[in-house]
Image (spheres, rainbow, N blue to C red):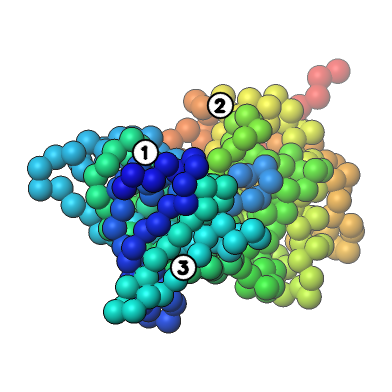
Amino acid sequence: MAADLRTDSLKLSGTVGTSVRRRVFLGFAPARVLAALSFADVLDEDTGIGYQRRFNSGHSQDFRRYVQEDGSSTIPLTFNLRPTPDDGWKLTETDGGMSMLEVQPSAGKVMARVDCQHRLGYLGDLDVSLPFMCFIGLSVREEMEIFSVINSKAKGLSTSLLDFHDASLSSDLWKDRPELYISLQLNSAPESPWCKQLDLGGRATSGLKRRASLRTMQKAVKRFLNQTKLYKMESGTTAAEAVIAFWAALALVLPTEWNSPRAYLVNKGIGVYALMTIAADIYSESNGQICDRKYFVGKLSEFLTLVDWGQNGPLKGLGGEGGVSAAVAVIRRARATRGLKVVNG
């Protein structure tokens, strides 16, 4: 293929057909050409733009080595020819069932990598021939839906990223998945100490260290909702505000532990699960009081500092449902004995 991708229009021959109910363009092209025409729409966790997993350099290097071995092969790479405002590409169906895809040099990368990000990642300088399939003109939302279906069972794909897709595609997230609705509010609300701290499975450009995954927080919030029955509320706003207020209060009561996530278990799975159960205890006892940050600070300050949250404390090594129950028991005992301190003098 002699065309200069910088100055000449590029023409790829193939055929147009149907993949179930979607029209697609099928063809073959050198890896370097497909790499030059395509991009991976990786989720930017700070802006919420994009939808794919973060790039795995190791996986891509493995595939580069593989395709240069004798007898190597691969299933077709999957792309989407995204609509462009300036007619950057044109697909012409010719006689005899053949078709021609023509891409203008000014169009740049017009093909989104729906299912080939890691296979194509390090092949930009190779002429090895690859089969490919392009969906034709899907919207980003339609593209995301197909990506989620293709990858929903893929090994190594972050469950948090799939959850983020569900949120993006849902028309009523509070009704469909209330625990996901609240978890995303925790990650986006400026007043939340978890703001931009949950790992969504994409690219984190802020440079902040993520404390827990979105999936971990969902499981913890679900414990809270099951105990308080707040999922029966008409709106998720009050429920989300209560959970945010609880964590904001905790960050005030345990500033050292909160600001040192590597040294303490407050932000680890066992701590997050157990603390959401304690949050449900306190919320259920509110008797009509507003469950704001002040309310939770008053309650948590009575006992939370009595628990050893360190890596070698009573929560060390706890895991699974049994471990969460044990951790909850430790915290509840601290709360029950808070009034038994001996005061000298």
The amino acid sitting under disc 3 is: Leu
How much space separates mark 2 and mark 3, taking CA atoms?
A: 54 Å
Where residue 332 appears, as percent x and y from the top left, is 64, 46
Q: Nearer the viewer, mark 1 or mark 2?
A: 1
Quadrant assignment, res 206: top right
User: In this view of the protein, can residue 89 be seen by the observer?
Assistant: yes
Mark found first going from the N terminus, 1 or 2: 1
Mark found first going from the N terminus, 3 or 1: 3
Name of the residue lying farthest toward the top: 345
Asked whether disc 2 touches disc 3, contact meaning CB atoms under 8 Å apart, the reply is no
Looking at the rendered image, the quarter that the C terminus falls into is: top right
Q: Residue at x 23, y 54 (%)?
A: 74
- Front-lying residue, 17 or 216: 17
Numbered badge on residue 124: 1
Residue identified by numbered label 2: 262
Determine the secondary structure under disc 1.
loop
Q: Residue at x 34, y 63 (%)?
A: 13
